[in-house]
Amino acid sequence: MCESKIESMKIKEKDLEVRYDLYQPHWYERYLQPCVVELLGSALFIFIGCLSVIENVEGVGRLQPALAHGLALGLTIAFLGNISGGHFNPAVSLAAMLIGGLNYMMLIPYCISQLCGGIIGAALAKAVSTEERFLNASGAAFTTIGEADQVSGAVVAETIMTLFLVLAVCMGAINEKTKSPLAPFCIGFTVTVDILAGGAISGACMNPARAFGPAVMSNYWKYQWVYWLGPLAGSVIAGILIRLLIGDQKIRLFLKHP
C-alpha cells in the first residue's frame, strides 16, 4: 500500500515537472527572438519614416512624415510588442531598463538590433527611391539644424519630446496602474504630435536609431550627436520621474508600503 502511494507521488511530481517545463519559455523566446523582433520592427518603422520624408509631397509640410511615423510605430508595436516590448528605439529601451521593464543584460543587444534595423530600413528606403529624391531629402537624415546657435534649442526640444514619448511608453505599456490596451496607438500619436510641434526646431527625431540609419546611408553626420544626447537625456529623466514619483508600488523606490 505504501509502495503504491510512493509511486503515485513520484508520478505526480514528474507530471508537475513536465508542466513546469512547458510553461517555461524556450531560450530562443527569452533572448534571441526579442532581438530579432526589435531589428525587424525598427527596420519597418524606419523604412516607412524615411520614405515619408524622401517622397514628401510638396505643400503637405510636416503632416505626411508626422502621420507616417506615428501610424507606422503604433501598428508595429501593436503586432510585435508582445514579443519584445515593442521599443524600436534605444532611448525607450534605456528607460524600460531603468524602471525594471527590461533585463539590464538585454539593453545592449536591444540597442544593437535597433541600430541595425535603422540601417536596413534606411537602405530599403534608398533602394525604392529615385536618386534625385533621395539626394534632395539627404536620405531622410536630420538636416534641420543649420547653424550652431540652433543647437541648444534642438537639444532641449529633443530631450522634452523624447521625455513625452518615453512617458507614453512606460506609463501606457509597463506601469501596471496605468497600462492600457490602447498604448500602441497612444505611443504612435505621441510621435505624430511631437513631429508636428517640434519638427521645425530639431526635426523631432526622439530616436537614435532613426537618426543613425539615414546618416549611414547618406553619409550625413552633421550634429548627429544632438540626436543621441537629447533622446538619451529625455529617457533618463523619464526613468527618474517614474522611479521616484509617478510609478506604481512595484516600480516606485520611495513613499510606498513596506
Image (cartoon, rainbow, N blue to C red):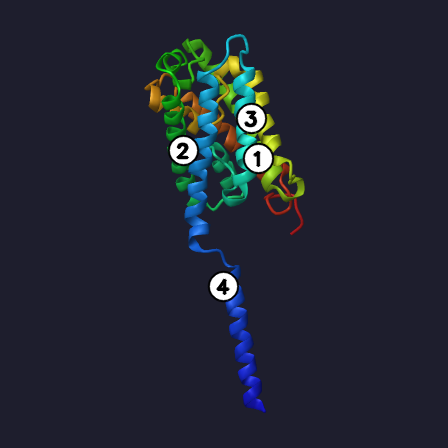
- Residue shown at 56% from the left, 26% from the top: 70
The three-letter code of the residue at mark 2 reads: Gly
Gap in Å between the C-alphas at discs 1 and 3?
13 Å
What x and y, as percent, mark residue 236? 50, 33
- Residue at image mark 4: 21
Q: Is residue 81 above or below residue 5?
A: above
- Residue shown at 53% from the left, 30% from the top: 73
- Quarter holding the N terminus? bottom right
Q: Residue furthest left?
A: 219
Residue 186 appears anywhere in the view: yes
Residue 160 appears anywhere in the view: no
Badges 2 and 3: C-beta atoms under 8 Å apart?
Answer: no
Query: Which of the numbered marks, if any, corresponds to residue 70?
Result: 3
Mark before the other along the chain sequence, 1 or 4: 4
- Residue shown at 41% from the left, 10% from the top: 148
- Residue at image mark 2: 117
